[in-house]
Image (tube, helix red, strand yellow):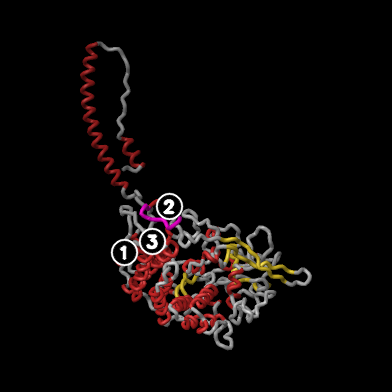
Amino acid sequence: MLCERHQSRHLGFLRPLRPRVRRRFISCAENDERRHQHQTVNNKQKVMKKILQIGLGAAMLFAVASCRKTYEDEPLDRLTDDYIYDEMDKNATYAKLALDNIYSFLPNGFNRISGAVLEAGSDDAMSSTPGHATETFTNGRLSPTNNPDNNWARSYQCIRRANVFLSKIDVVPTDEQQKIYWKAEARFIRAISYFELMKRFGGVPLLGDRVLTINDDLRIPRNSFDQCMAYVIGECDAILPLLRTDIATGGDWGRITKGAAMALKSRMLLYAASPWQNPSNNPEKWVAARAAADSVIKYGKFSLNSNYANVFTTRSLPEIILAFQRGVTNDVELNNGPVGYTGSLLGKGATSPTQELADAFPMINGQPITSATSTYNPADPYKNRDPRFYATLFHNGMRWLKRNVETFEGGLDKPGGTIPQTQTGYYMRKFMANHTEGTAYSTQTHNFIIFRYAEILLNYAEASNELGDVTNAHKQLVALRKRAGITAGADGNYGLKAPALYSVTEMRDAIRLERRIEMAFEEQRFWDIRRWKTAEQVLNGQLNGMKITRNATTGVFTYTKVPVKTVSFNASRMYLYPIPYDEVIKNDALTQNPNW
């Protein structure tokens, strides 16, 4: 086809001119003669027309040939696969960028759900903005067309990019050992993308190494959960010997290592063994989950950091197995800090932790606040608590930025009116650096931790207990409480009973409590109450906060637990997300989850 410029040039000068005719009266003889001459002219014109048509065809061919150098069949600034995976690129510059792009699909938490943390859709917190999107998880309005955590398309985009990378990286003439690492890393990210799909939707279509095109049959049915699990576990096992052992240099922090593959396997098998996917409580599944966690422990590369709060503001520690790497920022503080400060210290206060979470933290002696020996004082509820309490929550009277936080009614950080502010009397403190006496929110390391060693200990404890090994489960909880700063007590049990005094059911409750405290706001609780199938218990009824009033004369505070939000959870369908409506419409082989 001619480009517009050549069409006007060639067709314009080849267009024949129409002769002008001068009218006059002529005789019959002259008319016959004219008729003969006209026929002759017509015959000549037919010949000329044929010649012109041939010339026009040649001109058009010339024009097309000349246009081929300028016609763009795709944007010239687009990097195609041939550019990215270049057999002449010894430095693998573009291929490395392609892998970095695949890394960008790793789970990245903090305020990712319309400015709120995911746990704002659990019993641990709520958004400080009434009517926020996270209420979809607690008001029964989740649907195939309304899901603020719909990652179906994103995960499959990552899977496709990983498959393209794996199918083409071998043509790049870079270091062979580097390519082995890269391919294993891409396979890990593909595997964790499937896991992210599975914990939301259950079994999903497995694509393997295929790079689908528009000519393929895209009516792909779902695989079962067990088939997907086998795939993820198989990938973790296959890439384990191909990955780096550990990261020694700063430039490689955040890269996938053997520990990350083992940690993913541990989490995958724990989910598969839980009531969500193991209603008959098949012990073989718990055996596999325990073995996977034990392999990370015996690997010997990881340990608990001595300071709990510092884990979340340090780029590289022996406790961190894998974290999503981010630049130094102060966005966590600005998004979640108390709202009563001014200028550059003004926080949005996006997250309101619940009273249920606050009450879950024991006292410094490890006793629950309901225990007669705990020393808990309802008139002074924030005194002598588990140190993790102060690393997780802002409470009334807590020191921050050279003043005490005021979440009492009418206080600086709960002023009333229409601005978003705490609904519960608390703000989220976790992940922030220590700004107790600071004058500014200095930039800090805020890498979202995907796997850390504390989770592995909790995984091991849970699996051990379900197999009847209460003693080993107890040992892991003691390690976590000791690191937290809870006092040992005369019996050395850090507020726990002696192992022999626990039944499996009692120890199960203790493990779940410890997991809630230790992993708060790390996108664990939201999924834990689903895999334990306890969401129908904790998300039906009221979530509470603390109403705090100050006596204008004496300055004494009164603390009253009050209901803040009514929540509901439909157990018949909400343990799985609905598959997005547009995906089901496009693929009639894709069956929807039950009761959606």
Quadrant location, the N terminus: top left
Residue 390 placed where, x, y %? Answer: 61, 75
N-terminal-most mark, 3 or 2: 3
Q: Is residue 140 above or below residue 100?
A: above
| Principal secondary structure, stretch drawn in magenta | loop
Residue 468, label in figure = none
Identify the residue shown where x is 23% and y is 18%.
Answer: 35
In the image, residue 588 lies in the stretch drawn in magenta: yes
Q: Using residue 366 as the reference point, say whether residue 29 is left or right of it.
A: left
Asked if the residues shown at circle 2 and circle 1 are in contact, with their CB atoms under 8 angstroms apart, the answer is: no
Direction right: furthest residue: 553
Label 2 SS: helix
Q: What range is drawn magenta here?
A: 587-596
Label 3 SS: loop
- In this rendering, does residue 532 appear at all? yes
Q: Amino acid at mark 2?
A: Asp
N-terminal-most mark, 3 or 1: 1
Few, some or many residues within 10 Å of mark 3 (<14, 14–19, 20+): many
Give me the C-alpha separation between circle 2 and circle 1: 29 Å
Residue 204, label in figure = 3
Label 1 SS: helix
Residue on which the image places disc 2: 582
Q: Using residue 58 as the reference point, say whether residue 230 is left or right of it.
A: right
Depth check, mark 2 against mark 1: the one in front is: 2
Residue 477 placed where, x, y %? Answer: 51, 80
In the image, residue 233 lies in the stretch drawn in magenta: no
Q: Amino acid at mark 1?
A: Ser
* Residue 252 location, quadrant: bottom left
Q: Amino acid at mark 3?
A: Val
Identify the residue shown where x is 37% and y is 52%.
Answer: 588
Residue on which the image places disc 1: 167
